[in-house]
């Protein structure tokens, strides 16, 4: 079975669906942190946390070759492993797939998460579906650090009345490789709550329009890892 087909056997609740935007400064993130509403949606109180994300792969790049990414995240008192797979297939409607009609802002892909530890050997982590899938993808080979993202993340709940729609994340990111700072990214992500239903295109369009109306934001078709790799490549050229 091809690695990319794994998305087809995931429960819909394991598919991450989010809108991604980018900024060239912290200004738009500051405005979003201070707003009470995003269009008709209510925003919850901002909560800020410092995160250290280490992206891992085998020496021969097995995960990247299969279209998967492994993120080892450290938050105060917690380590979490996240496996993110190839883009999940979208169901095309009369006007095309949502990802196409939203200009590339909509990202849908399988994501499997589980507990980890400070060590980078999955065999030292508690048992989880994420650990098992990682060992399957790597064939048990040793993991190495590709790059590090140090980020200050501000999260706000997004609600339609009493119903939680998703989580708005405002990320100030420092890209680091081999201990050396490479550059900065300013990212805005709106992750929808996971349900068995496909995201409604009308709602996604409204949310995207409301985010762009804040000013200083642009649609981001790349993942955060892809942006960090592109930044490193530009600096190294």
Image (cartoon, rainbow, N blue to C red):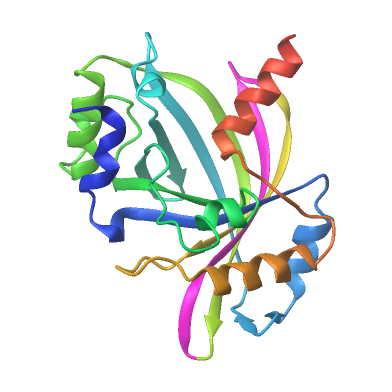
**Left or right for 30, reference 137:** right
Instruction: Compare residues 114 and 4 and report the one nearer the observer.
Output: 4
Measuring 61% from the left and 48% from the top, which residue is drawn there? Answer: 104
Count up the numbered dots.
0
What secondary structure do most residues of the magenta stretch adopt?
strand
**Left or right for 107, reference 14:** right
Query: Percent position (x, y) of residue 220?
Result: 67, 45
Q: Residue lying at the far front in this picture: please name it.
A: 94
Query: Percent position (x, y) of residue 210?
Result: 72, 71
Residue 177 covered by magenta stretch: yes
Quarter of the rendering occupied by the C terminus: top right
Instruction: Compare residues 212 and 161 and report the one nearer the observer.
Output: 212
**Left or right for 18, reference 222:** left
Query: Percent position (x, y) of residue 177?
Result: 60, 20
Residue 52 covered by magenta stretch: no
Query: Percent position (x, y) of residue 117?
Result: 31, 37
Measuring 50% from the left and 37% from the top, which residue is drawn there? Answer: 53
**Vertically, is 17 above or below 172?**
below
**Vertically, is 75 above or below 133?**
below
**Left or right for 71, reference 175:** left
Measuring 36% from the left and 23% from the top, which residue is drawn there? Answer: 63
Q: Bounds of the magenta span? A: 162-180
The quadrant holding residue 12 is: bottom left
Quarter of the rendering occupied by the N terminus: top left
Measuring 71% from the left and 82% from the top, which residue is drawn there? Answer: 36
């Amino acid at each position: 079975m091809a690695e990319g087909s794994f998305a087809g056997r995931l429960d819909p609740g394991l598919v991450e669906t989010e809108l991604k935007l980018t900024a060239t400064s912290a200004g738009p993130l500051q405005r979003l942190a201070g707003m009470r509403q995003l269009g008709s949606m209510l925003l919850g109180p901002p909560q800020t946390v410092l995160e250290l994300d280490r992206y891992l792969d085998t020496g021969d790049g097995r995960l990247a070759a299969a279209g998967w990414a492994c993120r080892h995240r450290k938050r105060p008192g917690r380590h979490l492993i996240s496996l993110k797979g190839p883009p999940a297939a979208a169901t095309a409607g009369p006007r095309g797939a949502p990802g196409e009609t939203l200009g590339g802002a909509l990202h849908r892909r399988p994501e499997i998460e589980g507990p980890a530890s400070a060590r980078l050997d999955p065999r030292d982590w508690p048992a989880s579906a994420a650990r098992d899938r990682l060992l399957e993808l790597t064939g048990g080979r040793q993991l190495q650090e590709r790059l590090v993202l140090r980020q200050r993340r501000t999260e706000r709940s997004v609600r339609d009345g009493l119903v939680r729609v998703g989580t708005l994340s405002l990320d100030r990111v420092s890209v680091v490789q081999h201990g050396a700072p490479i550059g900065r990214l300013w990212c805005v992500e709106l992750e929808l709550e996971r349900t068995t239903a496909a995201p409604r295109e009308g709602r996604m369009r409204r949310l995207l329009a409301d985010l762009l109306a804040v000013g200083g934001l642009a649609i981001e078709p790349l993942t955060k890892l892809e942006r960090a790799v592109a930044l490193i490549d530009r600096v190294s050229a």
